[in-house]
Image (spheres, grey):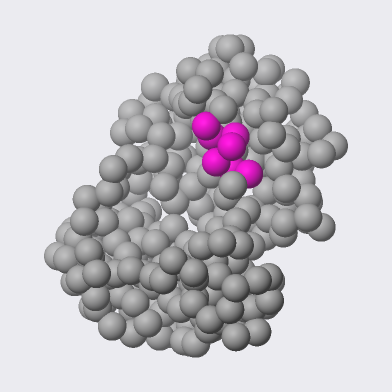
Amino acid sequence: MPITPTPNIWMNGEMVPWDQAQIHVLSHTLHYGTGVFEGIRAYETADGPAIFRLREHIERLFNSARILNMPMPYSIPEVIQACKDVVADTGLSSCYLRPIAYFGYGEMGLSIEHCKTDVAIAAWPWGAYLGDDAATKGVRMKISSWKRHDHNIMPPASKTTGNYANSTLAKMEALAAGYDEAIMLNSAGLVSECSGENIFAGLGDVVYTPPTSAGALKGITQDTVAALADDLGINIAVGEMTRSDLYIADEIFVVGTAAEVSAVNSVDDRAIPCPGPATKAIAEAYAEVVRGKNPKYRSWNELAS
């Protein structure tokens, strides 16, 4: 989706005009993929724009940096406040945020010894990643020929920029073949996740989602959905799945900050009932909680300054 510019981007503690938020062409991360990032959404609520599960996202950003052995020049509270400042600066009632930490200009070569960590946060208006009607009409999925990263090759627990070359290849393959999204298997042939979302599949009276050991990112939206499903009496279990499980599933949905809750209507041209009852109930509950309409989870909505 094209990006609609907003007035400023936060860079290393300062608001910089959107078109002046630039990096050096020899920045380490541009060449070697050594950055970490997050995707976060702010939603319109009765009290003003609120960022959903902001602390959890920033804590994961810092954990990604630890996995990459990247020193962070700001504290978690400082980055949280910067995210709030960015949302307030846009003047938007809802938006998508992209915090990123990356090794900047300083040394060329694989070593990061003389590269300092830069941090930036941008925000812009962005609709549902898989389409505004994905929750009801569903999306067409393809099992990718590209395998998901192994934990000892590129750690999938870290949202590292370089990791997403793997996801980009899978996404491009799916789109070129006429599908909406790719489902990735791990080296053992088990379901891992999509190119940018966690996946859930209903089989009988249980809705399964793959474990992190399968290469899936531990998703914050995935965790949100599990909590809401428990409230709704929907049985969620973490368990291994094969591609054949997807073909015979009673329903499938995928979740992520960008995609929110999106139904799946087919996998490799095998029709999937869409939207299933669990998908519909969870999508409706999610739409309420992110907008501050569920008092039980009001603490997940942090108002922008």
Query: Within the image, what quadrant is residue 203 found in?
Result: top right
- Is residue 146 shown left or right of residue 53? right
- Is residue 301 shown left or right of residue 164? left
Q: Residue at left 78%, top 50%?
A: 150
> Farthest residue toward the right?
188
| Residue 26 in view here | yes
Q: Is the C terminus in the top left, top right, bottom left or bottom right quadrant?
A: bottom left
Q: Is residue 151 above or below residue 244?
A: below
Q: Residue at left 45%, top 34%?
A: 262
Q: Is the N terminus in the top left, top right, bottom left or bottom right quadrant?
A: top left
Q: Residue at left 43%, top 76%?
A: 119
Residue 304 x %, y %: 26, 72
* Nearer-the-camera pick, 288 or 57: 57
Query: Within the image, what quadrant is residue 14 found in?
Result: bottom left
* Nearer-the-camera pick, 95 or 265: 95
What stretch of residues is rendered in magenta? 166-172
Residue 36 x %, y %: 54, 66
Q: Residue at left 69%, top 34%?
A: 146
Q: Is residue 219 above or below residue 201?
A: below
| Residue 231 in view here | no
- Is residue 301 shown left or right of residue 233? left
Magenta run includes residue 168: yes
Q: How many marks?
A: 0
